[in-house]
Structures are given as structure tokens and as C-alpha cells.
Image: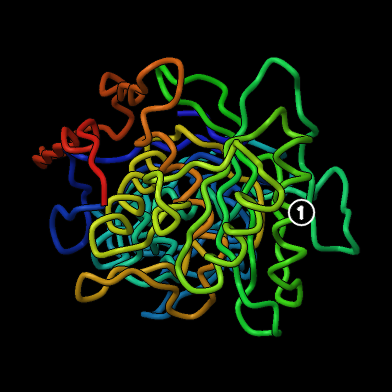
Amino acid sequence: MEKHGIMFKKNIKYKISTPSGFKIFSGIRMKKAKIIRFYFIDNEFIDVTEDHRFVVDNKEKIAKDLKIGDYLHHKVFGNIKITKINNEIGIKKVYDPIDVDGNLYFGNNIVNHNCEFLGSTNTVINTVTLETLLSSYIEPEHIDLNGRLYIYEKPEKEFQYILGVDPAKGTGENHSVIQIIKIISSVPIKLEQVGVFRDNLTDVYEQADIIDRLSNYYNGAYIMCENNGEGSAVIQRLWWEIENENLINTGNKATKLGIRSSRVTKPRAVLLMKKIIEDGSIKLIDKNTIEELASFIEEKNKYFGKDKPDDCVSALYWGIYLLEMNILDDDFEFRERDETEDIWGILEDVKSEENWDWLFTSFHD
């Protein structure tokens, strides 16, 4: 699967050979990087990146810090000595297993140390996807509204857009966030993040004006705005004063304006976001959003940012939740996974099942 220059293959059926037997792992990541080649006896060698990690004398060591005479552990021959180092190989594609149970595995019969992911084990988004996302953010094409609005792509007239909105008080605490999402296709679903508004000092009155302006600018973008707390004031102004008809509501009464976060709607929105992100059906490029996703966890049936705020994530899942509102021209379909590309070698099967049928059942809070 190609994603922002990084290819990874999610693992759902194999185990990998390690010093402690066959172990589970999350997937394979590909990247292009500068290579170091280490030679051993009989001209055997291994190519790795400069930041690749080995275990030397029971301690983790970075490849670029290794020297001639250092020993690595070989699956068959035990400790073998590095006899020559070549730093002039250049740039090559390399493949790394991600999230190996126990963090050690055999590669070219040499014991390697897995790149241990820094996120929590109960992050909503799996670690393979997070590893990829954390290396994929880019700088915005344009910054506006005194540094509050990041534009990655201007509107294109042939596309529909969504604004996912998580309002805040504007008193310096939580951030008000607007996620701007382009709908490339709905069959299969394909989305792209093209802009983000993020600020913690913008009052609710101005937030409504900015939402309205962005909705008009992005071809009459649908507005998916949470109405809990201060969101109610933002929505009331959008609907009754500004009269923006692009606001999506769960009902016709004033109490039903916008999207209500509840014990029913929030988990469904979060799990739909998870499915869309992990399938590669949305391109995410905003640094704040990606870093918040890396800290967004599930604990005791609650979803929240553990070490970071989660305002960007909230705006994102409400934007994606538009798919459940039955207002697009076509019913959406998930992208079909390609399970034919086996790139791990001879490994053991691991069974996995998922059932996402409930996502096709609409409901009202």
C-alpha cells in the first residue's frame, strides 16, 4: 500500500522468526534511506540504515556507531565479527517489521532490534499506521488568519468538501478546530485533509463566522459541528443568524442542531475514523492532527488524548462521520484490502476477523 512516499503492509496472518521463537508483529514498513553495509567472514554482509538498531553485548546500539571489530549475534554461528564497513552504498529501499513482540528478530540471520513505537499500546489507531503517519506530515501551502488557519490545498471546483468542527470557549484552554476534508470519491471512499483551523483564543462568535466563510470558500462545504457545550452557541449563530444551510443536523428542532456527542455517537464516529485511517482511505498531512492521533487512546470504553489534547482528532472524526448521515449522492463503500501481496517470507499464519456491517446501518441519537 503506498501512502505519502511510505509503503507498509499490515500483517494479519504471519509471525516472524526471533531468538525466542516465532512472534507476532504488526506489519512491514518500507522507506528509502542511506545505507551502511557491514561485512563479516567469507564476505557475508548486511545492509541497514544509519539509525538501524542492533544488540551488541546485550546493549542496544545504532548502526552508524558500530566499528570494525564489533560483534553481532548470528542465528547459526553465534557472535560474528564485523570485518569491514562500507558507507558509500547510497540510497536504497529497506523493509522493517513493525511492533515485533519482544522487539528482537532475525534479519539476514543477524539479531536485529525492532523499532519500538513510542505510543501507548492502547492507541485507537494501530502502531503500523501511526509509524507511517508520523513520517508523512508536510508544511502548509499557505498560513492565514494570523497563524490560525493552515491551508494545504485550495478548493477545486469539481470536489465536495466537509468541515469537521470541534468548538471551544476561546479562553486559552481547549482549541477550537476545523478540519477541512476533500471528498475524492465515495465508492470506494477516498478522502484528503486539505486544511486545518486551530486556535484557543477565538471566541464562539468569530468561530461561527470563520466556519461560514470556509464553508462558502470550499464549494459550500458540509458542516459537521459538535453541539455540546460551547458548540451550541456556535451552531445557533450559524443556523439562525448567518443562515448557513450547509450545517448538517440530526433533527429539525433547535435541540437537534449539529451533531450531539453521546455514548452512542462518539464511539461510532471514532471507530469509523479508525477504519478509514487504517484502510488508507484518508490522506492526513497536518502535524498537529497526526501527533494527537499518536496519543489518542481507548481506556475503559472512553476515548481521549493521553499526553496531548484531542481537539484535532475530535474535529476529524466528526468530519468523517458525515458518511453516516446519508446525504452524499452515492452510498459510501470501504476500500477493499489487497491480501495477495506477501512480502514477509516463510512465516506462520495468524487469524484475524473484522465485522464492520454496523457502519452501514444509519441511526439517530
Residue 18 coordinates in the image, percent (x, y): 22, 57
Q: Say which of 66 and 292 sits in front.
A: 292
Residue 262 coordinates in the image, percent (x, y): 30, 63
Residue at 22% of width from left, 48% of height from top?
16
Residue 33's place in the image compared with 61, above or below, is: above
224 horizontally vs 216: left or right: left
Q: Say which of 147 and 327 sits in front.
A: 327
116 horizontally vs 169: left or right: left
Q: Quadrant of the N terminus?
A: top left
Residue 70's place in the image compared with 145, above or below, is: below
Tally the numbered discs: 1
185 horizontally vs 125: left or right: right
Work out whether residue 255 can be spotted: yes
Circle 1 sits in a helix, a strand or a loop, which is it? helix
- Tell me where residue 204 sits by quadrant: bottom right
Q: Which residue is mark 1?
A: 210
- What amino acid type should be assigned to the residue bearing mark 1? Ile
Residue at 60% of width from left, 78% of height from top?
174
Residue 188 coordinates in the image, percent (x, y): 40, 19
**Residue that extends furthest to the bottom in the rendered view of this protein:** 172
Work out whether residue 5 can be spotted: no
- Tell me where residue 215 sits by quadrant: top right
Residue at 30% of width from left, 52% of height from top?
106
